[in-house]
Amino acid sequence: MDLERVGRYRVLRRIGSGGMGEVYEAEDTKLGRHVALKFLSSLLSSDSQALERFQREARAASSLNHPNVCVIYEIEAHEGQPFIAMELLQGDTFRQKITGAVLAVDEVLDLAIQVCDGLDAAHSKNVIHRDLKPENLFVTDRQQAKILDFGLAKFAFDAAAGPDSPTVAPSQLSTPGSTLGTLAYMSPEQVLGKALDVRTDLYSFGAVLYEMVTGTRLVQSQVTGAIFDDILHKPSASILSNNPKLPKDLDRLISKALEKDRELRYQSAAELRSDLKRLKRDLSSRASSGNIAARPSHKRPLTAIAVLPFENANADPSYEYLSDGLTETIIDELSQIPKLSVVARSTVFRYKNRELDPQAVGKELNVGAVITGRLVRRAEMLTVAVEMVDTANGLRLWGERYNRRAEDLLAIEDDIGRHITERLRSSLTEKSTSRGRRRPTTRNTAAYEAYLKGRYYWNKRSETELRKGAEYFEQAIALDPAYALAYAGLADFYIVLGWYSYVRPQDSYPRAKAAALKALEIDPNLAESHTAMGFISLLYDWDTETAEKYFRRALELNPKYAPGHHWYSDFLAANLRLEEARNQARCALELDPLSLIINWNMGWMLYFSRQYEPAVAQFKSTLELDPNYLVTYLFLGQAYVQQGLYDEAQAAFQRAADLSQRAAVSLALLGHCQALAKRTEDASKVLAELQARAQNSYVSPAFFAWIHLGFGSHDEGFKWLDKALAERSNWLVWLNADPKYDPLRSDERFARLLDKVGFARRSTGTS
């Protein structure tokens, strides 16, 4: 068989071989990416059972789309030899990683959580792997776990029709692809030939975990009958018998995974993952205290804290800006303390205007203490009551009441931060409780109040409230021309104004740039302004090198700045560094788990990675936080479009249009979907509506291009994309990454467009 050229693939080298066949590295000449080609051996290609197993692997794995499952691109045949084209991975199998070595517990937990993520995705699609072992688990050079080889996978609902054929039937013991190594990781029900469900994978993975932390195989016997007897009857050895220093909770976890009675075992990968995450958290907390043993709650180190939204106890809601602003300022102040984890604003503000039990919220947020506050303003007097509550027992750790004149607001804020820091000193080292570099502020109380009002309205995100916020930022600047944060706020306003295409790019981004540069002139170490400059350099200047320098500097200055990780992920996605983009998005999500925009952004990165089902799941998860979050519907609809689910997509876009008073972007995506679905009359009406609107207000040319592309009118689409290019539309930054442009990628006009935006034509794979 000639293997220099296989269809559109150019074979580069042989990677290895196994019982089922051989694997080669190849270049996909059409998409410009490197892939792995797995060929069924010529000896087995005529074996109907082997061929079915081979095809089953392709069907099972290709039905999944998850970052912890090796991606299957297609199954084809070359000169009569079936092959699978799959994701090319760089790294080691778990077998290679654990041979002659025992992994650290924290590394085991990190990898195990990822494997559970992949298993949960497979099981949710009714796919059981049935052959989990160290050889079928992989860790990339970037420490990402991948599940491989679904050659024995079976859809769970098949099992409902009757018991599976025993995987260890005598006829299989001598066939390629079935080894004693495979047998050693089988569940008891698999050995007995019973109908299998997802719990068989959890047992097998428990056996892998056992080996990862002890360095020895769970089943030591080498003879088939003895292996079966051990699996069915021999109690599993404790990991502590190999290493007494291992955590007892880890021993209990692995023992539960290895229960011979599957009713007593973990019932789902999600349940196992929760225990792994809980153990990782607890071990991390104990390690930071330097003492694994439990401590009395009043001496437990407060390494994580949440500041809940301060209550505005005034009858006048116009003082909301004051209570919200004070909350944000204290969060920012405490975030400067090294080694103290402070829950981000977006997450804690999910609890605003709710009756709260601070202890319950603290446990929900997984922090050691919660700070609550209440603010009352009467004429020129301001009263702020603050207290800190221990999450473990609900006891009051500290409290203070501040009665000052309203003009002393800055002093109150400073005192609160200093008193909380002093209270934390008993938990953290002296060095750790230094408040770090103070955030640039103003001594002008009126300027500070104007800034707080600006942020309050900016967070609302509608065009009307954004513009109101900008007025307050400008007011703060007028009152104190050296107020760096006010310039940073103004830059953020213009960025969002341009991002949502409320105005022409040239009317927003140059002004954003001027404000951000002024903020950096006043304070070169302001992470927010470095992040803003990174985004402006990406969206308007189309200067990727400069953009990345700004993003990296922002995260050097403040590694805990969730929006910095969020916006950097967008930059990485635009440059098709998709795995890095997903990692940055996850980092932002860990820092700010209840932020709507950051939850949405995680789905967006999955969408760009062509992982549409996980993207849909993430968007739906975001909508559980807020069913009316507009931007989520826009991108949920796009994920549905890429799956060909046009009815679902149209419903999502229609909901976005309803929520936004028929914003142009929602109409453009609706029209694009309708055109693709051959609902020509509906799409034409939407196009006409946008054309009429463009007579009186700004509509991005990119929006017209989308609808024409939906119609298949590429010439008209390119005409509008050229207009978008002329005005430096931020939507063109996503040309390389956005799947909606896939039909244009073979057109030379698209290559020229990319070149003008500053991007080379690249593969759009799921790297």
Image (tube, rainbow, N blue to C red):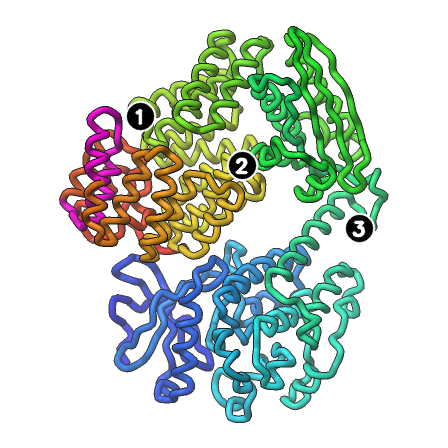
Residue under the image location 69 percent in, 23 percent down: 374
Mark 1 sits on what residue? 503
Q: Secondary structure at mark 2?
A: helix
The magenta span reads 686-715
Mark 3 sits on what residue? 292
Q: Mark 1 is on which residue type?
A: Val
Position of residue 403 measured from the top left corner of the image (x, y, whole percent): 74, 12
- Which of the marked residues, 2 or 1, is nearer the chain's N terminus? 1
Q: Quadrant of residue 166?
A: bottom right
Judge from the rendering whether residue 524 lies leftward or rightward of residue 265; answer left or right: left
Per the picture, the main secondary structure of the magenta-coloured stretch is helix
Measured along the vertical axis of the image, is residue 84 above or below residue 468? Answer: below
* Residue 213 shown in magenta: no
Q: Secondary structure at mark 3?
A: loop
Residue under the image location 34 percent in, 43 percent down: 654
Q: Residues within 10 Å of mark 1 (few under 14, many from 20)?
A: some
What label does residue 562 carry, if any?
A: 2
Residue under the image location 59 percent in, 80 percent down: 181
Judge from the rendering whether residue 733 lies leftward or rightward of residue 324; answer left or right: left
Measured along the vertical axis of the image, is residue 534 above or below residue 745? Answer: above
Position of residue 634 measured from the top left corner of the image (x, y, whole percent): 37, 43
Q: Mark 2 is on which residue type?
A: Ala
- Which of the marked residues, 3 or 2, is nearer the chain's N terminus? 3
Return the residue nearer the eye: 537 or 235: 235
Q: Quadrant of residue 8?
A: bottom left
Q: Mark 3 is on which residue type?
A: Ile
